[in-house]
Image: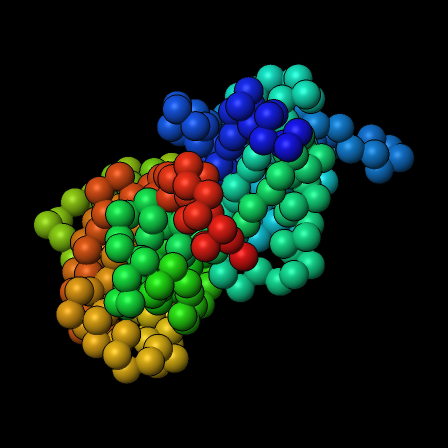
Amino acid sequence: MLSAVLGLFSQDLALDLGTSHTRIWMRNHGVVIDEPTVVAVHRNTRGRRKVLAIGKDALPMLGRTPHDVHTVKPIKDGRIADFEVAEALLVHLVRRVHGRNSLMSPRMVVAVPCSTSDVERRAVRDSCKRAGAREVHLVPRSLAAAIGANLPIEQPRGHLVVDIGGGAAEIGVLSLRGVVASKSVPGGGEAMDEAIVTMLRDRFDLLVGHGTAERLKLEIGAAMTRPPATSRVAGRCLRTGVPRAVEVSAEDVTTALAPAIDAIAAGIREVLEGTPPGLASDVAEHGVVLVGGASSLRRLDIALRDRIGLPVMVLDEGRAAAVTGIGRALESRDLLEAVSC
């Protein structure tokens, strides 16, 4: 009864704690937070840590801090790797959108990988409660993305959703509001950036940061060969140790990205092999839906289609599909109970 009364005054929240970005959806407001999942931490001589900056304030510090300050990305491959720092991030962002009044504690719904263990789920719930939640629900990320993509998951029909985030690609076949088969492929957008960093090191003897690699990916990157294009990239020469700039072609970037795309295609095939024939035939008819920030890579849908032999569609505005989906679930008690894990 008390929880119901508090719910009349609190602003319930949906949370997508991603490797690259954390997004928070608030009832009646939509997505109110979209911040980099980065925290700057100072460590003193006794090993004690103190948070200095969070999100967009911490992002410019990546690779630019003294020895006693570290920029921490607490989410790795879609999972929480540093619970202490992740909790500090949660508390900061929740207080920003919900205020500090503990009498108006929100309900929180969080998107998690389908393969999350019971221990990991319990840790996420505990962190959310310490951040101020009075009630916590967890929803598999594939289901959340499907709801955000407006797929009719309540029907007895198979849907294959691939959510390519910063740290992993969540692949799931869904039917009747449940996950039938799923797989998490480590990598995602940050693996693509790392592949570009490696290519520049091996091919050009040039050392660059991940920010430079991401810019190159966005400027001329593609999953398949595109019209010729080049971009000038500056970094540190590994032979001389001094700054140097080189011209990098779109073909160089496409070649570097191929293994990451091959891994996603292999994951899709593996999930389909574990899918009942009836649902697999539905997927063959309706195709694969791509969502997530890294799904915006040019010609990724065509590259995956050629690799798996199925229609592939990229959702417009798919970057926020997961947080939008759990936000919609938050508005419907029946749907929330059906998709919670």
* 255 in relation to 17, above or below: below
Identify the coloring. rainbow
Q: Quadrant of the N terminus?
A: top right
**Percent of width and height locating residue 109:** 52, 41
Q: Quadrant of residue 279?
A: bottom left
Q: Quadrant of residue 329?
A: top left
Q: Residue at x 41, y 41 (%)?
A: 332
Left or right of 237: which side holds 116?
Answer: right
Determine the residue positioned at 55% across, 37% down.
108
- Measured as percent of width and height from the top left, residue 6 is found at 61, 25
Where in the figure is residue 226, as x and y percent of width and height? 14, 53
Query: Front-most of 336 and 205?
Result: 336
Which residue is drawn at the image coordinates 38% and 44% (left, top)? 325
**Where 241 sits versus 102, above or below?**
below
Q: Nearer the viewer, residue 12 or 214?
A: 12
Residue 227, above or below 286: above
Locate residue 177 relative to residue 91 in the image: left or right: left
Say whether residue 150 is visible: yes
